[in-house]
């Protein structure tokens, strides 16, 4: 991991952008599948469920910004929690995936693992609160 906090924060933010782009293009890619639009039109999805998935999708969007503005401690836990919630959100669609979805999800999970590893290495305490001996 790089020593420079700005670079670490930028890397985390960039990885979240990578995750988001994969999520977006995975969904856009589905529109090319024959019968996908008809299948979407036939689904009876409640507004509450759409709202829940909206919240889950908002987490990676927020994580593009938050690594740049949070302290190291807050960054560490925000990224780890966001990785966990985003992973569960991605896993919730597993029963209906096809090969191209699996490809995009593998890419997303690799980025999420990298985010978790980088975030885990962030300090547990703010350096300003630590005493030097």
Image (cartoon, grey):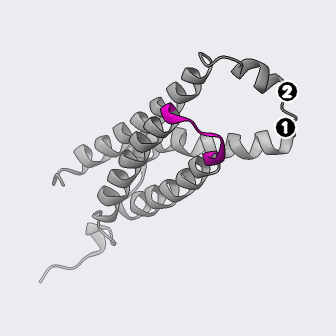
Residue 56 as seen in the image, left or right of residue 69: right
Between 109 and 75, the residue placed more toward the observer is 109
**Circle 2 sits in a helix, a strand or a loop, which is it?**
helix
Q: Is residue 34 above or below residue 45?
A: above
Is residue 95 within the magenta segment?
Answer: yes
Q: Are marks 1 and 2 in contact (CB under 8 Å)?
A: no
Residue assigned mark 2? 42
The rendered magenta stretch, by its main secondary structure, is classed as helix
Give residue 56's position: percent from left, percent from top.
Answer: 63, 46
> Does 58 sit left or right of 38 as displayed?
left
Q: Residue at x 57, y 21 (%)?
A: 28
Q: Which mark is residue 45?
A: 1
Q: Quadrant of residue 31?
A: top right
Side of 39 relative to 68 (left or right)? right
Among all residues in the image, which is located at the extreme left? Answer: 133
- Residue name at image x 27 percent, y 68 percent: 128
Tell which of 95 and 17 is nearer to you: 95
**Range covered by the magenta-colored residues:** 93-100
Pointer 2 local density, CA inside 10 Å: few below 14, some 14–19, many at least 20 = few
Whole-percent x and y of residue 73? 39, 65
Residue 17 % position (x, y)? 42, 34
Q: Position of residue 44 (x, y in %)?
A: 88, 35
> Which residue is pictured at 45% across the width and 60% down the height?
80
Q: Quadrant of the C terminus?
A: bottom left
**Residue at 73% across, 19% down:** 37
In this view, 125 is above or below 12: below
Residue 119, compared with residue 124, is above or below; it is above
């Amino acid at each position: 991991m790089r020593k420079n906090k700005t670079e670490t924060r930028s890397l985390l933010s960039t990885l979240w952008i990578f995750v988001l782009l994969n999520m977006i293009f995975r969904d856009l890619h589905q529109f090319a599948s024959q019968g996908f639009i008809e299948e979407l039109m036939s689904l009876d999805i409640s507004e509450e469920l759409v709202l829940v998935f909206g919240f889950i999708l908002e987490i990676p969007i927020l994580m593009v910004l938050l690594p740049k503005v949070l302290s190291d401690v807050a960054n560490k836990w925000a990224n780890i929690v966001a990785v966990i919630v985003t992973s569960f959100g991605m896993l919730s669609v597993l029963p209906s995936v096809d090969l191209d979805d699996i490809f995009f999800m593998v890419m997303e999970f690799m980025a999420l693992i990298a985010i978790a590893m980088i975030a885990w290495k962030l300090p547990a305490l703010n350096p300003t609160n630590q005493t030097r001996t």
